[in-house]
Image (cartoon, rainbow, N blue to C red):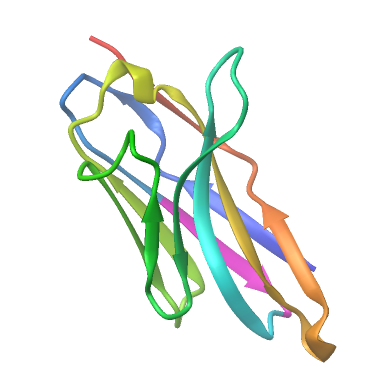
Amino acid sequence: QVQLVESGGGLVQPGGSLRLSCAASGTIRRIDVMGWYRQAPGKQRELVATIISGGTTNYADSVQGRFTVSRDNAENTVFLQMNSLKPEDTAVYYCNVQGRLPFLRPFNTWGQGTQVTVSS
C-alpha cells in the first residue's frame, strides 16, 4: 500500500506565501502523476496543479502564475509553492499520487488534507 504524509498548511495573510509538501512511501514501483487538489467549504474538490513523471505541469487558471508545483523523484515527494495568496485560496488541500505497485498494479492515493487559511 501507499501512504502519503502532507505538511505545510497554516494561516497566512493575503499576499503571503506557503509551501506544501507531500511524501509518498510504500512499495512503489513507479509514480506517474503527483498533484494537489483543494476543497473549500460548500464547494466541490477541484484541481490545483499536477506534475507528471517527465516534469510537465498543469495548473488551474485561478492559480496560474502564483503557484508552482514541483517534485523530487528520488524522495517521492511533491511540493506546492503558493505565492500571492488570496482569501479565495482558503481550503483544505489534498495531495494525490497515481502510479504502479509491484506487478504493475495501479494505485491512486489521497493524502489526509492540510488546511490553508488566507485571512488578515
User: What residue is rendered at 52% in x and 63% in y?
Assistant: 34
Residue lying at 15% horizontally and 25% vertically, measured from the top left: 15
Residue shown at 45% from the left, 83% from the top: 74
Query: Measured from the top left, where is residue 79 in percent x and y?
Result: 38, 57
Q: Is residue 55 above or below residue 43?
A: below
Which x, y percent locates residue 77? 47, 67
Residue 94 is left or right of residue 17, and the answer is: right
Above/below status of 48 relative to 70: above
Q: Is residue 62 above or below residue 98?
A: above
In the image, residue 46 lies at what x, y percent? 54, 35
Quarter placement of the C terminus: top left
Q: Position of residue 81 (x, y in %)?
A: 28, 49
Q: Which residues are magenta?
A: 21-27
Q: Is residue 60 left or right of 102 when viewed as pictured?
A: left
Direction from residue 102 to residue 15 in the image, left or right: left
Residue 5, by quadrant, is bottom right
- Which quarter of the picture shows residue 88? top left
Residue found at x 48% / y 78%: 53
Please tell me whether residue 23 belongs to the stretch shown in magenta. Answer: yes
Looking at the image, which residue sits at the far front? 61
Total marks shown come to 0
The verdict on residue 58 being magenta is no
Q: Main secondary structure of the magenta part?
A: strand
Q: Quadrant of residue 61?
A: top left
- Position of residue 24 relative to residue 4, above or below, is below
Q: Quadrant of the N terminus?
A: bottom right
